[in-house]
Image (spheres, grey):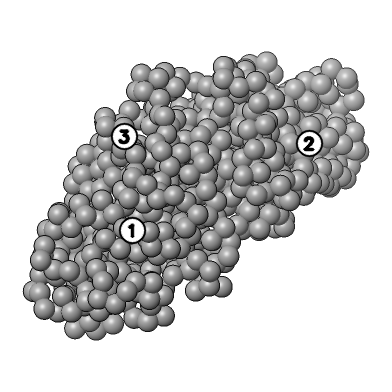
Amino acid sequence: MEGEGTAIRCDTFRAARSPGGPGDATAAMGSAQQSPDPLSPSSKAVSISIYDGPGAAGALPGRGAETPGPLQSEPILQWSDLSYEVGSVVGKGAGARTVLDQISGDLRAGEMVAIIGSSGAGKTTLLNALSGRIVGGKLSGAVLFRGARRDPGSFKRLTAYVQQDDIMHTRLTVLETLAYSSKLRLSDAEYTPEQKIERATEIMRRLRLEAAQNTQIGDANTRGVSGGERKRVSIGTELLTNPNILFLDEPTSGLDSNSSQVVVDLVKQVARDQRMSALMTIHQPSARIFNTFDRVIMLSQGRLVYFGPPVAAIDYFAGLGYRCPMHENPADYFIDLMTIDYTSEQALAESRARVASMAHTFAQHSHKRAELDAAAARLPIAAPAPGPDLDAAHAAAAPRNGWLFEYWTLQHREWVNVLRNMEYLVSQAFQSICMALIVGFMFFYLKHDAISVQNRLGVLYTIALNATFPVIMPALYGYLQERDIMLRERAAATYRVTAFYVAKFTTLLPIALVSGAVFITGVYFISHLVFDVGKFFIALGIYACLNVVAVGFTLMVGSGVKNIDVGFVAAPAIVTIWLLFGGLLANPASTTPVLRWLRWVNPVYFAFSALLQNELRGMAFECDTAVQCYRTGDQVIKVYSVGRFSIWGNALFLIMHAVAYFVAGYVLLRWKIKPRYIWI
Ligand SMILES: Nc1ncnc2c1ncn2[C@@H]1O[C@H](COP(=O)(O)OP(=O)(O)OP(=O)(O)O)[C@@H](O)[C@H]1O
């Protein structure tokens, strides 16, 4: 497919020009060889006049239909001497490592620019530095947005970032995904609910997603939209707000060449139509894709090797003595040129010297760079976006919608997602029913004899246990996935953290409560715990309190850990400690003084104490004269040292735990997990 129609390769591009003309590669080579400085003003090698004249449109495949004209737009984003250093690894090579080295450039309204280079060249770092997403390290230089320093709040609102990984709600359909984003991202003050849906539908249409509008996004386990469609949905959610600049990190990674082309073409189309600028990193673009960009930034080892129109690059590098071979994809050729070759000492030295020379040459010849800029300026690019003035932009940093609206929308989205997750719902139901039957029949029909004392302790402890692992682990998994979506959406200032946090709590809690109620009811009646309506509801209430604690704990751990791996180690470790010191395995009164404080931070201990008192207070046991046994439930409570606080006292401690976890979770989510972006 490449090489046909609008595709260019080094040779096809050269053939489009007359021999010996200003853009002729042979002449360029000749000049390059004759002149020690191929970029010297006298050299004809780097000619960018190839865009001039009536033939120019034809020489730029894909642009023929557009009317070339002078670029009207001012740079929307400018950066100069952008450098980024990180602390290097420990050991021999320890020290600062330069990831970006004095990069300067600009992005104009309506143009689409690509950052290309070999792996590790610094593409993503440059994109992140320009989009305000650098965390850690030392960033220096200047970045101006609309001629002024960036204000983080308004910059986030006026730009958008499409991450490489498309993290989305997998059970929502394409249209729902866009519609919920539209509801949350567009302001109630500017759009009616109908207009928000219209906007989502319009974006869907623009990105040619109508055929997939009712298909769920899907994941590794559930088939959903294709990779290309998924990427387009991801881009669509960012386009809803009509950003001034769209940053995209590797939008074509993992896509076949056709889907990649579609994605890039659509971004370009939208950029033109919406008068938006697009800046993307891209890995090994095809020749066609390479030619789709208005300008390309070529990086190697964090240094700028070229910044200009893609087709002018062929002559530029020919001028340096690097002539793109016949039939070669220019992008591949340039990336090879910029790649450090580690195959041998000699290859390493040569490739390093080559890159250093190319970077040096580009930096030294600012007049040539001005010519490249001028060549780019002659390309037909949409008129500049009538961007809001900075005061308006500052105002735009205020929340877009009311808290309650955000909460209800997020809550609704959560429930749609949960209710469609049949595997999760069935496994929850299965878990509570099976556990109720197993535990119920394990302690089947308890009598009032000596043996039943041990069994009553066992069944009540198992009830407490069932509100820990089975509630926490699945909820933690879901929460950590949601948290990543929230962080992405929050980076675009989509909604408040509190609205997300409360919505998450009020989704997780009912699920835990319903499955817990099924479990405890089954166990209560099968194992024949005390048949008393009041006691049953008190047990249910204590169990519900422990469930609230478990959900609060899940939110706290989920908000505090860096990733799922840490969460799945930390949460079970803490819950195991709860169970060890919960009151059944070791007598709380005999716990070593060093660890006795653990009881105060152990919800299982308080729940078990309350459940035991609720069950045993006032109970009498029939003792066989042959064995020693407890005659009353009160004796058991005393011996097990679980009567320190009343049932209500224990319930109060549980509620205090829940509140503490809930608040701690919020603080962690707000301050710890929030990325600390560096702004310059
Ligand atoms: N915070 C950091 N700490 C340590 N090293 C970093 C940091 N940020 C970037 N680097 C290093 O800088 C180099 C450039 O990283 P970057 O992700 O920008 O490369 P890239 O060109 O996007 O590569 P790829 O195409 O493989 O994604 C890499 O070697 C990376 O390991």
Which one is in front, 342 or 441? 342
Q: CA distance from mark 3 to mark 1?
A: 33 Å
Q: Quadrant of the C terminus?
A: top left
Q: CA distance from mark 3 to mark 2?
A: 52 Å
Quarter of the view holding residue 72: top left
Q: Amino acid at mark 2?
A: Ser
Residue marked by disc 2: 515
Quarter of the view holding residue 315: bottom left
Circle 3 SS class:
strand
Question: Residue at coordinates 56% horizontally, 73% vertically from top-left?
Answer: 1
Residue marked by disc 1: 53
Q: Amino acid at mark 1?
A: Gly
Question: Residue at coordinates 52% horizontally, 48% vertically from top-left?
Answer: 269
Tag 1 near tag 2, CB within 8 Å: no
Which one is in front, 160 or 645? 160
- Going from the N terminus, do you reach mark 3 or mark 1 first? 1
Q: CA distance from mark 1 to mark 2?
A: 74 Å
Q: Amino acid at mark 3?
A: Phe
Circle 1 SS class:
loop
In this rendering, the answer to whether 111 lies above or below 671 is below
- Going from the N terminus, do you reach mark 3 or mark 2 first? 3
**Residue 639 % position (x, y):** 66, 29
Instruction: Check the image and name the residue furthest to the left.
Output: 36
Tell whether 158 sits left or right of 656.
left
Which one is in front in this view, the residue at disc 3 or the one at disc 2? 3
Circle 2 SS class:
helix
Mark 1 is surrounded, within 10 Å at the Cα level, by few (under 14), some (14 to 19) or many (20 or more) other residues, namely few
Query: Label for residue 454?
Result: none
**Residue 453 % position (x, y):** 79, 35
Residue marked by disc 3: 145
Tell whether 502 sits left or right of 29.
right
